[in-house]
């Protein structure tokens, strides 16, 4: 919890508000009743929040202890406290912090009512998963088909919605995780209580329980806080929303600052409807729009406003700036992602020659896999870069795992790679087995791979474990043999499929899992550029060494659009603006029109990160596995007015932009009527049925003998019988 000064230095209203514009001043001085400050990007929302707190204190409207200021991050809370200290003079207790830190403080005061003591512990993610795994074992639930992370995600979703186990009644919820989720949730909560522990979701859920079950506790806090201030209100989930409404029920002086056009976190529970229904929740509320932007040029703001205006679920505002000049947005069409990376690299070098620092530039992508092409280009050019909010492409766990498989295939004596993957995915190999393998390898003076082969051949490892290890060794031998007949990309795909590694992430059912699967696809695409496995592994080693050797502090930043929220740069590159990439196809498939609108809000966030220069680009072709697929520009490009764009070469974009303007409303209507169920949707039936005539680029024509999901058994006219993935063949 942060503090501000006990002795408030008197300050005239003019001193506090003299540098604010009219709307900002109105937001500061409207201190009675509910207030919603719709703060567009770059309009000074933090300044308004901190000045409002200082205004309340200096005018003696409340003591510091009677003000509740809620943020989403400790960094934001600290910044707010420092600014208020500067305005008022510096250290009286102020109830200021994140939802979770304030929740912990409230719960510790009344822990006994929840069956806890005030010294309860807060479990981290690893502890939560271990606890769930133990429950699954007790209930004889297979944690391979229904992994602990799946249950953890479902339980957290329920807690975000303010649902304790006794309130989960929705029919679809009752069927979650094959009908086991609710019972596991009940047992999980009981076990937490017996451990005198909570998880982070409980810090909000338990507050709701206290407020709804014990009126005297609600009265204590609701009457205490004369003023409630909330930052980033558009990011609140349902549980946080209910908690705030209960606290505001007494004095009704709640001020929420947020931007419905920047609500981009639905995947972690944020509910944009919270901010959209503010006037319904507080009928006498005052809505104040901050639209004067102090960050970006007119063309950038005009583009952002034009794009976001196509959303229907918004309260509405239009950004503007007193600045009169500025460059148009530069729009570039490229042949493929390789040319796109070269274009960005050339522009970055040109900007450097114009004395623009790398730290003032950023590349913002929709999905993490997109960074690879730019990382490799910058390494070639010697341009230092950093990946913010994530790892460099070849440092990501799933990529390192896949590369470890390839290393074992190429060099079976690679013990480090062998140890990394021997139990990934799980093969029932514990510490005792690994000790046996190491002991045998030392005694025979050989590799772990050969030691495993020896123990299996000698019959010293038997049963289920023996079968599992034998399959692993047999698979590795087969993949190594296939390198002589199949492309490296095809072998990699078979390896990821047959090892169960891809399935492991497909079953993960967490927000990160989908991104990991996309990264594996990008790895396969990258591998397709190399003639041999050794050439690829050498390339990875050189890339990794170059990245580790780079200690330059002046670097261009690379990150996803989600990670970029709240940041700003002089120069911003927005690559990959293609249908299916951005807007992302998965978001539309899973959430329909609602998903499309959130994707458009992401576009708005991306555009408004730029202060002076903005580049948007798209590739006409992308290589998926070993096949080229044509792309069309994002519909969001078509929503930017012509007057705000400078097109760099080619005429393809203009035609596509016009077609999207005509098509956009029709697509939105179709999507609005489509709401896929939240439960798992079965894979579509394969078009490669038994007897189907197919064609492969290397093996020629053949017939499908059997199809099992994406795996095909094919009898080729000249190459004989082979097992391949459907992605590498086509209907003849």
Image (cartoon, rainbow, N blue to C red):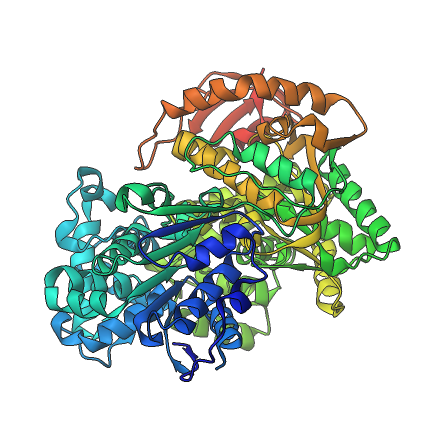
Task: Residue at the far right: name it.
Answer: 353
Judging depth in this view, the residue of 234 and 133 nearest the camera is: 234
Residue 147, image x and y in percent? 32, 53
Numbered label tally:
0
Which is more toward the observer, 690 or 562? 562
Residue at position x 17%, y 48% in the image: 168
Residue 423 in view here: yes
Instruction: Decide: is 658 above or below 404.
Output: above
Assign the C terminus to one quadrant of the image: top right
Residue 582 appears left or right of 673:
right
Q: In the rendered image of this protein, does residue 664 appear above or below residue 431?
A: above
Q: Pinpoint residue 545: horizontal percent, then vertical percent.
A: 73, 65
| Residue depicted at 54% across the width and 51% down the height | 476
Q: Is residue 333 visible?
A: no
Which percent across, then down, holds residue 332?
A: 75, 33
Horizontal arrangement in the rendering, residue 214 relative to residue 224 (left or right): left
Q: Position of residue 231 (x, y in %)?
A: 42, 58
Q: Is residue 146 left or right of residue 14?
A: left
> Quarter-wise, where is residue 528 in the image?
top right
């Amino acid at each position: 919890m942060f503090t501000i000064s006990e002795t408030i230095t008197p300050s005239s209203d003019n001193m506090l508000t003299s540098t604010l514009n009219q709307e900002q001043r109105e937001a500061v001085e409207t201190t009675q009743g509910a207030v919603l400050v719709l703060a567009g990007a770059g309009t000074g929302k933090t300044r308004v929040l901190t000045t409002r707190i200082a205004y309340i204190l200096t005018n003696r409207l409340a003591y510091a202890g009677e003000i509740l200021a809620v943020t989403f991050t400790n960094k934001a809370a600290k910044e707010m406290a420092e600014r208020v200290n500067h305005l008022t003079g510096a250290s009286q207790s102020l109830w200021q912090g994140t939802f979770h830190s304030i929740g912990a403080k409230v719960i510790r005061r009344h822990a006994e009512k929840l069956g806890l003591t005030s010294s309860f512990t807060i479990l981290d993610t690893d502890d939560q998963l271990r606890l769930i795994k133990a429950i699954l074992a007790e209930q004889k639930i297979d944690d391979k088909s229904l992994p602990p992370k799946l249950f953890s995600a479902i339980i957290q979703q329920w807690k975000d919605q303010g649902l304790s186990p006794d309130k989960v009644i929705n029919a679809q919820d009752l069927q979650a995780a094959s009908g086991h989720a609710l019972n596991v949730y009940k047992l999980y909560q009981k076990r937490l209580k017996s451990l005198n522990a909570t998880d982070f979701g409980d810090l909000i859920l338990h507050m709701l329980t206290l407020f709804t079950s014990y009126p005297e506790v609600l009265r204590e806090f609701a009457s205490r806080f004369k003023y409630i201030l909330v930052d980033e209100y558009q990011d609140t989930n349902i549980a946080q929303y209910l908690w705030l409404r209960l606290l505001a029920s007494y004095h009704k002086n709640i001020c929420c600052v947020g931007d419905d056009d920047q609500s981009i976190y639905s995947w972690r529970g944020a509910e944009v409807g919270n901010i959209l229904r503010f006037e319904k929740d507080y009928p006498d509320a005052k809505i104040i729009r901050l639209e004067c932007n102090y960050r970006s040029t007119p063309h950038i703001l005009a583009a952002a406003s034009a794009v976001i205006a196509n959303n229907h679920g918004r309260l509405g505002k239009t950004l503007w700036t007193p600045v009169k000049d500025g460059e148009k947005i530069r729009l570039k069409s490229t042949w493929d992602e390789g040319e796109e990376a070269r274009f960005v690299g050339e522009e970055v070098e040109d900007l450097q020659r114009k004395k623009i620092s790398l730290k003032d530039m950023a590349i913002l992508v929709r999905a993490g896999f997109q960074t690879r092409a730019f990382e490799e280009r910058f390494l070639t050019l010697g341009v230092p870069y950093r990946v913010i909010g994530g790892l460099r492409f070849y440092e990501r766990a799933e990529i390192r795992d896949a590369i470890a498989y390839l290393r074992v295939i190429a060099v079976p004596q690679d013990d480090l790679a062998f140890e990394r993957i021997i139990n990934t995915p799980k093969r029932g190999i514990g510490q005792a087995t690994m000790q046996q393998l190491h002991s045998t390898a030392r005694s025979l003076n050989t590799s772990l791979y050969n030691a495993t082969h020896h123990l299996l051949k000698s019959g010293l490892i038997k049963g289920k474990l023996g079968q599992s290890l034998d399959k692993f060794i047999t698979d590795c031998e087969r993949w190594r043999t296939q390198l002589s007949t199949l492309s490296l990309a095809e072998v990699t795909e078979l390896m990821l499929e047959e090892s169960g590694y891809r399935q492991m992430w497909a079953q993960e059912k967490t927000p990160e899992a989908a991104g990991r699967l996309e990264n594996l696809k990008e790895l396969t695409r990258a591998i397709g550029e190399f003639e041999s496995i050794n050439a690829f592994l050498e390339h990875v080693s050189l890339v990794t060494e170059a990245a580790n050797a780079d200690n330059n502090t002046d670097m261009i930043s690379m990150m996803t659009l989600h990670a970029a929220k709240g940041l700003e740069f002089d120069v911003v590159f927005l690559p990959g603006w293609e249908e299916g990439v951005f807007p992302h196809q998965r978001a539309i498939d899973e959430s329909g029109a609602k998903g499309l609108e959130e994707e458009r809000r992401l576009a708005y966030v991306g555009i408004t990160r730029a202060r002076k220069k903005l580049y948007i680009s798209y590739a006409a072709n992308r290589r998926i596995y070993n096949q080229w697929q044509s792309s069309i520009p994002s519909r969001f490009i078509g929503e930017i007015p012509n007057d705000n764009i400078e097109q760099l070469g080619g005429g393809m974009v203009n035609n596509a932009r016009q077609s999207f303007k005509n098509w956009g409303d029709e697509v939105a209507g179709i999507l609005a009527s489509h709401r896929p169920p939240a439960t798992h949707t079965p894979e579509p039936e394969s078009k490669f049925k038994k007897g189907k005539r197919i064609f492969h680029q290397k093996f020629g024509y053949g017939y499908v003998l059997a199809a099992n999901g994406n795996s095909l058994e094919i009898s080729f006219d000249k190459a004989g019988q082979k097992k391949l993935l459907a992605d590498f063949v086509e209907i003849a």
